[in-house]
């Protein structure tokens, strides 16, 4: 595949992602394919939501396959993701300033950034191949380092690891971290179940992350989703989640609107499928 035209600057839909990964694996040794299969098996046996139940269809398969392949062939890229993925989250003014200084240098490409974080020097073939894989599984990095790239709507990436929360969650299982993120929100969910009330002491960030975690909980009571909706709406109306203008990074306000819309849709869809009257 030395003459392969790597899709470095292209946002691949799931079908295109499957085709891309199929071409890659066809060019690999049986040993690499076997190791990728083992990574996939381990991931799908352990990937659960905050109530401990498997969620095999939460993320499109081509993204998981791409990350498994990266872990087998280029584990330093997984380390790169683990070091940097949280920088796409909500930032305070100080952390935004630090982020701007450290990660948004206009004279540095995404390939340069990966090399700096890993301490490795890549040849042109490896560099282009890795950038194509990053474009598949973590498109948000391309948006950050290429200001001219198209800003995809949230609907495009809701079940893709290109949404940083999904990438962070998957990395907690496919990477070498211990799944602290899942355990944290599992504890909040247990408290929510115990009291039948949303915990009162959640920060804005914890509330929004918890809302996102509930999207994959099949057995979640409708009242729990409604309580989260009501709390997000209250904080938006009362100004506890402040309006912040931004074109690139996430803000609490943008994420609150995003989570509110998706929880509304999830509540309505589940209400219809379960035949219960709408409670909001």
Image (cartoon, rainbow, N blue to C red):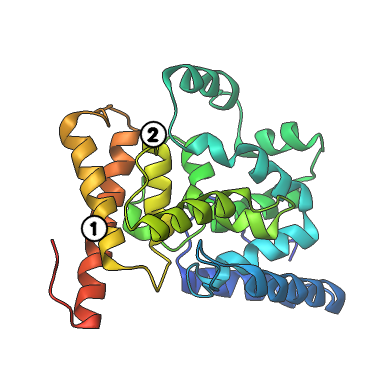
Q: Which x, y percent locates residue 25?
A: 72, 74
Q: In this view, does 7 lie above or below 272?
A: above
> Of residues 126 and 113, which is closer to you in this image?
113
* Residue found at x 55% / y 38%: 86
The secondary element bearing badge 2 is classed as loop
Specify the label residue 226 is tagged with.
Answer: 1
The secondary element bearing badge 1 is classed as helix
> Of residues 273 and 86, which is closer to you in this image?
273
Q: In which quarter of the image is the N terminus?
A: bottom right
Residue 267: name its quadrant: bottom left
* Residue found at x 77% / y 52%: 75
Q: Which x, y percent locates residue 65?
A: 64, 69
1 or 2: mark nearer the eye: 1
Residue that badge 2 annotates:
248
Is residue 150 visible in the rendered image? The answer is no
Residue 233 falls left or right of residue 180: left
Separation of residues labelled 1 and 2 (CA atoms): 30 Å
Q: Which x, y percent locates residue 135?
A: 55, 53
Q: In this view, does 111 lie above or below 175?
A: above
């Amino acid at each position: 595949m030395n003459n392969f035209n790597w899709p470095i600057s292209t946002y691949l839909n799931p079908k295109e992602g499957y085709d891309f990964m199929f071409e890659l694996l066809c060019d690999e040794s049986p040993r690499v394919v076997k190791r990728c299969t083992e990574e996939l098996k381990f991931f799908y046996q352990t990937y659960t939501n905050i109530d401990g139940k498997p969620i095999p269809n939460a993320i499109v398969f081509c993204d998981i396959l791409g990350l498994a392949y990266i872990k087998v062939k280029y584990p330093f890229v997984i380390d790169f993701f683990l070091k940097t993925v949280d920088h796409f989250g909500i930032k305070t003014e100080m952390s935004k300033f630090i982020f701007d200084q450290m990660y948004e240098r206009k004279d540095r490409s995404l390939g340069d950034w990966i090399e700096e974080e890993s301490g490795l020097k890549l040849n042109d073939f490896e560099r282009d191949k890795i950038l194509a894989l990053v474009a598949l599984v973590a498109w948000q990095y391309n948006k950050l380092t290429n200001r001219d790239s198209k800003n995809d709507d949230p609907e495009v990436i809701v079940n893709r690891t290109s949404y940083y929360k999904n990438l962070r969650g998957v990395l907690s299982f496919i990477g070498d971290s211990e799944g602290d993120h899942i355990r944290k929100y599992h504890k909040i969910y247990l408290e929510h179940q115990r009291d039948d009330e949303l915990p009162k002491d959640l920060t804005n960030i914890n509330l929004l992350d918890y809302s996102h975690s509930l999207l994959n909980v099949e057995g979640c009571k409708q009242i729990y989703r409604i309580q989260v909706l009501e709390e997000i709406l209250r904080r938006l109306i009362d100004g506890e989640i402040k309006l912040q203008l931004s074109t690139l990074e996430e803000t609490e306000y943008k994420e609150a609107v995003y989570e509110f819309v998706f929880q509304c849709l999830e509540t309505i869809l589940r209400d219809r499928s379960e035949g219960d009257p709408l409670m909001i």
